Image (cartoon, grey):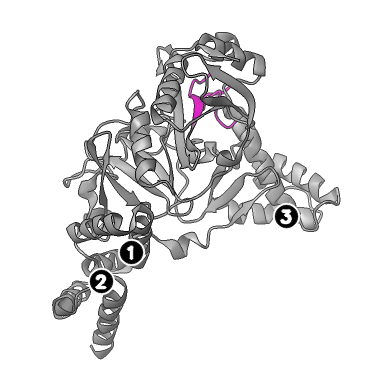
């Protein structure tokens, strides 16, 4: 019993130092923890319950966030909230920091996600990972705050107003990049992108110009893992796409002074830049409206068929001293007999590395690869280093084995591991090329001219 009391005292002291626990509430919290321990809760569920109990109430977190926003600005407020969510163990930063991460020579960032299982079920995304029972309709509804059945007792969210409507912000427990979070519509409606999406994204970066924010294409196979609930993703990191340059200038007839162009990028991306947000939103909307109805069967682009709609965009925006920069990524989830997982999806020869949807984050050059690869690729590296043939059980990695072996034996890389990292960067680049809806400049030019742009 003494060791338990000592552990509880340590947790209460931690909460006073890190979680803004008031001194007058310590006896109450001490007794609440004692009751939790005596109830027999174990493992991750215990951590969730303990830190949920020690954290400020959601209303207090929300009020504190608003107070800091008003007195110190949006960056100070998001920094405070992120730090709080790390300290109350909702954001598993210590786990995330163990994920391998590196940048390759082509500028892509590769991470291996050891924290979450591989996601391969688009049907689950359409349903939005719905929740049985309880008050919440899916895994990202605000009603999850404190919901023990999904280990959300320590989840804390804060209010947002986007497009004049109530939204909220929360950080992802297993974020893919610095301060990765989601802005979620308080109304449980399906993900969609229309003319109102662009002003809402602008509202977000006006409030938090230190963040980027974007929206997954709202279609199965090319979107996120929760399509049933309207939400955006963002955070405090410059992604590879943001560093890409315009390779072909285009002009909008209504706003000729808007800077616009096709990016030098393996996917199909149009950048729109202006100091006036209404100009960016109008041009982006005209581009979206043109793309969602565009057909060109000769190159595999089919806007709609018996299986539904296939064209969508992933818009993503940053704000700088020069104004707003909207990157519009053209996406298609059309499938064929040759490519049942998607014509513009990672092709089968790359599925051993990445079969999951290529969502907003990957489309911007940060690849999240499945955790299984850490062990599997280490074995492939071992076969190469020991000059052994690839065993039959590793046949799915033949392309990776052959190309990594050639890189290593070419003498440019001192270790097999560094050659493997370069190979992963090459494969991910080719996957982005697979997602490009236009493979030639001529085809893209025809679309842009049809959409009313001058090229």
- Report the quarter where the C terminus lies: top right
- Residue at point 23%, 86% (across, down): 5
- Report the quarter where the N terminus lies: bottom left
Number of marks drawn:
3
The answer to whether residue 124 is seen in the rendering is no
Residue 193, horizontal then vertical, whole percent: 36, 26
Q: Which residue is mark 2?
A: 20
Give the residues in magenta. Answer: 327-347
Drawn side of residue 259 relative to residue 5, left or right: right
Residue 231, horizontal then vertical, whole percent: 33, 38
Mark 1 crowd level (few <14, some 14–19, many ≥20, 10 Å Cα): many
Are the residues at dot 2 and dot 1 in contact (C-beta closer than 8 Å)? yes
Task: Kindly identify which numbered label has been placed on residue 418.
Answer: 3
Lower position in the chain sequence, tag 3 or tag 1: 1
Above-or-below relation of 247 to 26: above
Drawn side of residue 398 relative to residue 332, left or right: right
Task: Kindly identify which numbered label has been placed on residue 84.
Answer: 1
- Residue at point 16%, 45% (across, down): 135
């Amino acid at each position: 019993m003494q060791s338990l009391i000592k552990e509880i005292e340590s947790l209460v002291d931690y909460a006073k130092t890190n979680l803004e626990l008031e001194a007058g509430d310590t006896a109450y919290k001490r007794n609440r923890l004692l009751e939790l321990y005596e109830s027999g809760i174990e493992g991750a569920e215990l951590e969730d319950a303990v830190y949920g109990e020690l954290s400020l109430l959601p209303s207090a977190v929300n009020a504190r966030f608003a107070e800091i926003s008003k007195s110190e600005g949006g960056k100070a407020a998001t920094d405070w909230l992120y730090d709080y969510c790390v300290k109350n163990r909702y954001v598993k930063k210590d786990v995330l920091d163990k994920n391998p991460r590196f940048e390759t020579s082509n500028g892509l960032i590769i991470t291996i996600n050891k924290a979450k299982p591989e996601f391969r079920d688009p049907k689950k995304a359409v349903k939005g990972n719905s929740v049985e029972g309880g008050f919440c309709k899916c895994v990202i509804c605000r009603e999850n705050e404190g919901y023990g059945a999904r280990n959300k007792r320590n989840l804390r969210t804060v209010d947002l107003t986007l497009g004049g409507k109530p939204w909220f912000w929360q950080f992802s427990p297993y974020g893919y990049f610095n301060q990765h979070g989601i802005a979620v519509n308080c109304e449980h409606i399906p993900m969609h992108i229309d003319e109102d999406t662009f002003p809402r994204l602008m509202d977000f970066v006006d409030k938090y110009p230190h963040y980027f924010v974007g929206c997954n294409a709202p279609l199965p196979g090319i979107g996120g893992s929760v399509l049933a609930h309207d939400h955006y993703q963002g955070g405090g990191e410059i992604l590879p796409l943001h560093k890409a340059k315009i390779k072909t200038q285009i002009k909008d007839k209504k706003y000729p002074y808007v800077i616009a162009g096709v990016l030098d990028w393996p996917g199909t991306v149009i950048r729109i830049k202006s100091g006036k947000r209404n100009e960016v939103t109008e041009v982006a909307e005209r581009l979206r409206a043109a793309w969602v109805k565009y057909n060109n069967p000769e190159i595999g682009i089919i806007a709609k068929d018996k299986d539904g709609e296939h064209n969508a965009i992933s818009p993503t925006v940053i704000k700088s001293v020069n104004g707003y920069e909207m990157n519009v990524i053209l996406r298609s989830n059309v499938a064929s007999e040759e490519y049942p997982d998607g014509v513009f999806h990672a092709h089968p020869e790359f599925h051993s590395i990445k079969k999951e949807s290529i969502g907003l984050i990957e489309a911007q050059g940060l690849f999240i690869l499945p955790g299984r690869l850490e062990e599997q690729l280490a074995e492939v590296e071992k076969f190469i280093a020991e000059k052994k043939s690839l065993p039959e059980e590793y046949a799915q990695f033949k392309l990776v084995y052959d190309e990594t072996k050639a890189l290593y034996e070419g003498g440019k890389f001192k270790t097999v591991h560094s050659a493997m990292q370069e190979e992963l960067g090459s494969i991910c680049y080719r996957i982005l090329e697979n997602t490009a809806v236009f493979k030639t400049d001529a085809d893209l030019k025809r679309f842009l001219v049809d959409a009313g742009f001058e090229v």
